[in-house]
Amino acid sequence: MPELPEVEVVRRGLEPFMARRVIERVEVFESRSLKRHADGVEGFVRALEGREIREVARRGKFLWAPLSDACRATSSSPSLGEALVMHLGMSGQLRVRDGAGRGAYQASEPHVSEGPAPDPATHLRIRLHMEGGARIDFVDQRIFGGMHVSPLIGTADARAGGEGTDLPLIPQSAAHIARDLLDPFLDEGSLVRRIRMRTAPIKSVLLDQSTLSGIGNIYADEGLWEARLHFARPAIGISSRKVKELLSACRDVMQRALEVGGTSFDALYVNVDGRSGYFARSLKAYGKHGTPCPRCGRALVRVQFQNRSSHLCPYCQRRR
């Protein structure tokens, strides 16, 4: 599943083609991609056609586009407006095409030097026709992702909802998602205290999106390797200093991944122009089992953990 760096790359790619533009027409090719939209296909189309997108925002792995009625509530207008919520799930992609059907390619981006991936037209689920001729294609092979329109509500701390927006609003359907490590309004001191109150394994805590959003299996393994922590250590037994070191490691690895377009292992994650990210070349632990640990030279291993794989160095990351 795409994690924070991959979703942020997609957000930045969408913004020039969606922000401050009207959705002129909506086509739905697969109703299952609207499973979270209560009003069905007709209601989804009716809710979007003719409305302007204000901006494209992200918190953790969630993307949303506040519509033009998004605003701070007043006594005369108690509604905070609505947003188009986009979630990639396991295999979702948001691909931009210009008026001629060509992929939109930002030549200034250093991480997109290879040719675009084939257009997976057989998995096209939803298409948004935008003002100016661009279209946004939601492609999803496994149909775990989707789109829906959600009411906006105020953020719990009255701060901006996420990256790309200055509004203190978040979609109601994503209100349970915690702030992420790249969010300037994250209260890290409070986060450290909450992590240290948990008896669960530290990796489980990192993956809990209601505690800290944006981290999945890849960046959890990388951050734990950097901090020399075993994934199964109970969070409650880790010192504040070590938790801060772990959060710093996770933040650093995600920032480095973002600089090169995220991590792609196959064609399921690509940018809006169909190109892959290249951070897989820089991974130190994830997917590297059987190869020497970059720190001590001993073999990295892969072990099962809560129905997923964990990658670590059994010498550098000993379980105490």
Image (tube, rainbow, N blue to C red):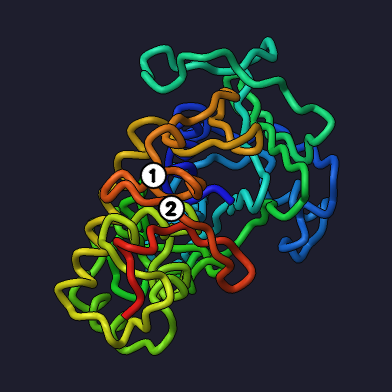
The residue at which mark 1 appears reads as 292
Disc 2 and disc 1: Cα gap in Å?
A: 6 Å
In this picture, is 236 found above or below 50?
below
Identify the secondary structure beneath mark 2: loop
* Side (left or right) of 212 relative to 237: right
Which element is circle 1 on? Answer: loop
Seen at 24% across and 83% down, the residue is 193
Which of 25/234 is in front? 234
Q: Which residue is at 60% across, 26% downward?
A: 96
Q: Nearer the viewer, residue 113 or 320?
A: 320
Q: Residues within 10 Å of mark 1 (few under 14, many from 20)?
A: some
Q: What residue lies at 52% left-to-right and 14% top-to-bottom? A: 114
The residue drawn where x is 76% and y is 66% is: 38
Of labels 2 and 1, earlier in sequence is 1
* Residue at mark 2: 300
Q: In this rendering, would 212 be left or right of 273? A: left
For residue 68, say whether it is visible: no
